[in-house]
Amino acid sequence: RGHDEIVWAVEASKGRLFSASADRSVRVWDVASRRCEAVLEDHARPVLCLALAPASDAVVEGGERASASSSGGGEEKKAEGSGDEESSEAAGDDDLLFSGSYDFTIKVWSLRTLSRVKTLTGHGDAVRSLLYVPPKKKREATAAAANNNNTNSLSLLGQRGRLFSASYDGTVRVWDVTTLRCVRVLAGHTKPVQRVAVVEVEAEVEAE
């Protein structure tokens, strides 16, 4: 207990449960003790959806995974502007939580500091669904290098993957999780988009 309104979404990772509510907050729960660790409050209207982007999913150019920073240090990162403006790698090596809301925004939260990293804007209506897609795996990047493939295997999904956001404005936006910038707007729907899904198709391998 703790939320004052309906709970719209939940996510879980590394012994924590995250709950999004119409009371405009996201609560962070310790699963073992069943206690609330923190209340993330910054949305102006109900929070409808959540997505997690683990730092352990990150892949560097050499095909190796980047490690997450697990302990303290450094200044707390503050949000500056929207996701459509130029942004540095503000997220660093933190595990990230994304929350979408009726206030038309997506908030990005650091799970190391439990603070807001950035606010992503651009949607013209409620953000109803979020989906995180991790980058290419190490084995895929290594195989591409071995085949002397000139196409950068990380170019499509980036070093930290992509976030897809579906909105009542009839669009799906694609965000680069490394830079926290919108890289594509998928338009075509004439009514609200309530769910989003990604199907990964494996490339065919030619027999020698």
Image: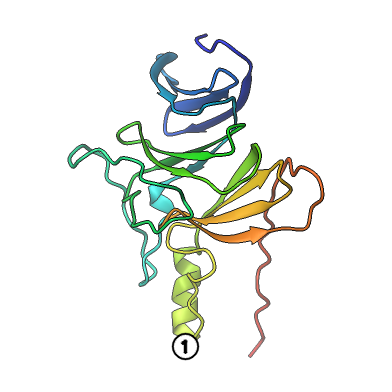
Q: Which residue is label 1 attached to? A: 148
- Decide which of 29, 41 is in the foreground and name it: 41
User: Element at badge 1?
Assistant: loop
Residue at (60% x, 13% y) in the render: 5
- Decide which of 122, 98 is in the foreground and name it: 122
Q: Is residue 26 above or below residue 14?
A: above
In the image, farthest residue toward the right = 190
Question: Where is residue 119, by image quadrant?
Answer: top left
In the image, farthest residue toward the left = 73
Describe residue 201's horizontal placement relative to residue 44 as left or right. right
- Decide which of 81, 208 is in the foreground and name it: 81
Percent coordinates x, y for residue 8 in the rendering:
63, 25
Q: Is residue 118 above or below residue 7?
A: below
Percent coordinates x, y for residue 180 in the rendering:
44, 53
Q: Is residue 202 above or below residue 29?
A: below
Q: Is residue 200 above or below residue 117?
A: below
Residue at (58% x, 33% y) in the render: 103
How many marks the image carries: the answer is: 1
The crowding category of the residue bearing disc 1, from other C-alpha atoms within 10 Å (few below 14, some 14 to 19, many at least 20), is few
Describe residue 29's horizontal placement relative to residue 202 as left or right. left
Considering the image in quadrants, where does the C terminus appear? Answer: bottom right
Describe residue 50's horizontal placement relative to residue 193 as left or right. left
Percent coordinates x, y for residue 96 in the rendering:
42, 42
Give the residue type at disc 1: Asn
Percent coordinates x, y for residue 52 in the rendering:
49, 41
In the image, farthest residue toward the bottom = 208
Question: How is the protein colored in the picture?
Answer: rainbow
Residue at (50% x, 29% y) in the render: 43
